[in-house]
């Protein structure tokens, strides 16, 4: 191929791309063609949403939980600043691995990374929780949600937005113990967990201290999920920014050898709505 011909091909390719995209930041086509004409396009634009609570002293823990503590070991007058962290494995936004409840099941480090980047859906039960702080997201809530949005994704994360995450800044209101010491916060009902196991989801996330509600006598929902080798994420933040469908969630859990629970930075990637497009799920 002569140099001139190469130049012509390059120019032709550029013109094709420019014509197909007509912006400087051309987006890749949603359905890739076998021989794409747009050669230097960008992936679809996505917004990152942080679903993680800030880690700081004073953050809420349930009875028996280990509070977060950060101690300064070295300071700038010695050349640099460094801290020691002390924290219970279930303090703050964290993942429960199946081995948390069931000996021999997967530990935190045995969860493969391709199960840590998953499609996520959000089920909104905020109104029901407003009327009843002990509300349990039920199998019926999931069936009603599916009637509108279609089935929850196999291998995906189902997130219950109870609205409770907004109380995290106020530990007393978040843990919400009554005069007898019984906690009152919402959770996920055993029948919902059973249905989600049947749907073969990767796990459930919630914006409270526990998937089992504060007043639960037995941790039945934990047992159903973890015995089925599923994962749980607790103390999620910022769920009001999450769409009901269309997000991809990155579960940046600490790779804790033989761990049964560990802190995680949870980031949701949400497609940005381009002009003229309808929002996913609407
Ligand atoms: Zn848990």
Image (cartoon, helix red, strand yellow):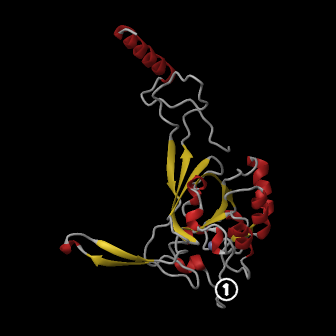
Quadrant (top left/top right/bottom left/bottom right) for the C terminus: top right
Q: Residue 201 versus residue 258: which sits nearer the camera?
A: 258
- Which residue is farthest bottom? 180
Question: Which percent across, then down, holds residue 148?
Answer: 76, 48
Check the image and report above or below for 53 versus 150: below
Quadrant (top left/top right/bottom left/bottom right) for the N terminus: top left
Q: How many marks?
A: 1
Quarter of the render that holds ligand 1: bottom right
Label 1 crowd bin: few (<14), some (14–19), many (20+), radius 10 Å: some
Is residue 177 shown left or right of residue 41?
Answer: right
Judge whether residue 246 can be spotted in this image: yes
For the point 56% across and 55% down, the residue is 113
Is residue 5 shown left or right of residue 246?
Answer: left
Q: Quadrant of residue 7?
A: top left
Question: Which percent across, then down, holds residue 56?
Answer: 43, 73
Question: Which percent across, then down, holds residue 128?
Answer: 72, 66
Check the image and report above or below for 27 versus 209: above
For the point 52% across and 77% down, the residue is 60
Check the image and report above or below for 225 versus 4: below
User: Can you identify the residue that label 1 sits on?
Assistant: 182
Judge whether residue 160 can be spotted in this image: no
Q: Residue 194 versus residue 175: which sits nearer the camera?
A: 194
Q: Is mark 1 within 8 Å of ligand 1?
A: no
For the point 37% across and 8% down, the residue is 2
Mark 1: secondary structure: loop
Question: Which percent across, then down, holds residue 221?
Answer: 73, 71
Q: Quadrant of residue 134?
A: bottom right
């Amino acid at each position: 191929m002569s140099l001139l011909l190469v130049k012509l091909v390059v120019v032709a390719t550029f013109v094709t791309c420019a014509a197909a995209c007509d912006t400087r930041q051309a987006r890749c086509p949603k359905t890739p063609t076998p021989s794409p004409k747009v050669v230097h396009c960008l992936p679809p634009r996505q917004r990152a949403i942080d679903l993680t609570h800030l880690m700081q002293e004073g953050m809420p823990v349930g009875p028996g939980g280990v509070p977060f503590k950060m101690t300064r070991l070295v300071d700038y007058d010695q050349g640099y600043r460094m801290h020691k962290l002390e924290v219970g494995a279930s303090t703050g936004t964290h993942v429960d691995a199946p081995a948390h409840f069931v000996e021999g099941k997967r530990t935190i480090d045995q969860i493969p990374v391709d199960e840590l980047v998953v499609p996520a859906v959000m089920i909104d039960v905020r109104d029901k929780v407003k009327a009843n702080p002990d509300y349990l997201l039920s199998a019926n809530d999931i069936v009603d949600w599916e009637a509108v949005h279609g089935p929850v994704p196999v291998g995906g994360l189902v997130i219950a937005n109870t609205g409770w995450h907004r109380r995290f800044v106020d530990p007393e209101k978040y843990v919400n113990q009554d005069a007898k010491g019984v906690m009152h916060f919402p959770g996920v009902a055993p029948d919902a967990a059973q249905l989600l196991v049947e749907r073969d989801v990767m796990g459930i996330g919630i914006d409270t201290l526990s998937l089992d509600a504060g007043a639960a006598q037995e941790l039945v929902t934990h047992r159903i999920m973890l015995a089925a080798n599923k994962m749980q994420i607790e103390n999620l933040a910022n769920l009001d920014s999450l769409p009901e469908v269309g997000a991809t969630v990155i579960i940046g859990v600490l790779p804790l050898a033989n761990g049964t629970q560990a802190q995680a930075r949870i980031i949701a990637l949400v497609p940005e709505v381009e002009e003229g497009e309808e929002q996913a799920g609407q």
